Amino acid sequence: MQGKVEKSAFAALRLFRGGIMPDLQGEDVAGAPCPSHSSRPLVSFFAAGRNVQEYVEQAMRSMLDQTVDDFELLMLDDGSTDKTYDVMMGVQDPRVQVLRNMEGQGIARSLNRLMSQCRGRYWAHMDADDICAPQRLEKQLQIMQANPDIGICGCHFLAFLPSGEGGLIRLPLDSESIKANLLFKAPMAHPFVTFDGDLFSRLGIQYSEKMVCALDYELYLRIFLRHPQMAFANVDDVLGFYRRHDAQISTARSTEQAQYAFRAQMQVFQALGVAPGNRLMRHHRHLYGGAPVETAEDMSGLVDWAVTLHMANATRKLFSPDLFNALLYGRLEAAMQRSPHLAQPHLWRLQKWDH
């Protein structure tokens, strides 16, 4: 989490917490006329979850309470051992369809199953334990409909703890900035991304079922490399509320998540003409993580690795050189500042870097 949380973001979050909006706590969301099954909805909302009985109703009602009403909502229970399926089935709305895996199939296979059932022109993903703002679809569709080359659209989001404490996460907005960030992190919030469903169907894009973690990151990287014509975008607004709790993959499997993320990055390293082994994984992680460099050898290796990436992109021009160099320089400088006693012998290399 980073930065100060804007008051407006917390105010929006409070709309979904503590019974402040009773219609999100137990009453059916009223109003929106549902398109018949014979007509195609504009949007297919889809979400999969396992053992999220405490959160899934709130998630579903936030999706149903959109300012855009032409959508279906597809939910999937991935073999839960609690009452998640019953809670899903208990949300009575004609736009809702509930699927079930009797045994857990994993998130990638579950999401692929859901996408195969989506009938909408656009596919809006959400995690089954998070919350989205009522204007989420409206604002994402405004951008996507005005820019048909955009295949994935996300937004800023507020990450919050059970205590209510949280932090606002701002993400890069335009496609080239998003792409330049891809080598370091996932610059889109997977719980709140909307896909161009027609484009995904035509290109046969699915999640990799080999990915236990970081499957969204792998998806973005694969699209970037294989479908360079597809643009990315993030709405410049807080439209998602990301719930942090112990049961999440991102919380419970942080080490495994990092390993799968590095595996996903390998396809980009190969496209750049560099092939780092596992020993270089820690160098790259220092460019996007907060852990300090601990040894002089690692600091030297980190600087060498950053120079290698700089030169490789200068040759291949996979990323916008100006954007990529500025990001790479900034991340290297931040890593060096976290271990200033080890960075001193390498400062001259920063000074000579043409960024």
Image (tube, helix red, strand yellow):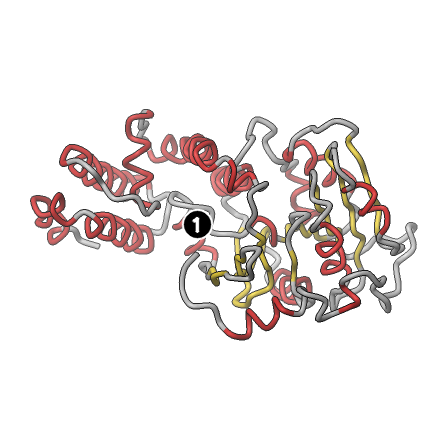
Q: Which of the image's four quarters has the N terminus?
A: bottom left
How far across and how far down the image is residue 321, in percent?
31, 51
Q: In the drawing, does residue 346 fall left or right of residue 256?
A: left
Task: Please say if 268 is above or below 157.
Answer: above
Q: Quadrant of residue 80?
A: top right
Question: Going 44% across and 59% down the picture, which residue do you hit?
Answer: 172
| Residue depicted at x 60% and y 64% | 239
The residue pinned by badge 1 equals 179
Coordinates of residue 202 in the picture (x, y in percent): 68, 40
Can residue 2 be seen in this snapshot?
yes
Tally the marks: 1
Q: Is residue 254 above or below residue 240?
A: above
In the rendered structure, the answer to whether residue 24 lies left or right of residue 170 reads right
What percent of the width, then of the height, locates residue 20? 70, 71
x%, y% of residue 75?
Answer: 77, 45
Judge from the rendering whether residue 349 lies leftward or rightward of residue 338; answer left or right. left
Q: Nearer the viewer, residue 341 or 39?
A: 341
Q: Nearer the viewer, residue 302 or 337?
A: 337
Look at the image and tell me whether residue 173 can be seen: no
Neighbourhood count class around disc 1 (C-alpha, 10 Å): few under 14, some 14–19, many 20 upward: many
Image quarter hosting the C terminus:
bottom left
Q: Residue at x 75, y 66 (%)?
A: 68
At numbered mark 1, what does the secondary structure look like: helix, strand or loop?
Answer: helix
* Circle 1: residue type: Lys
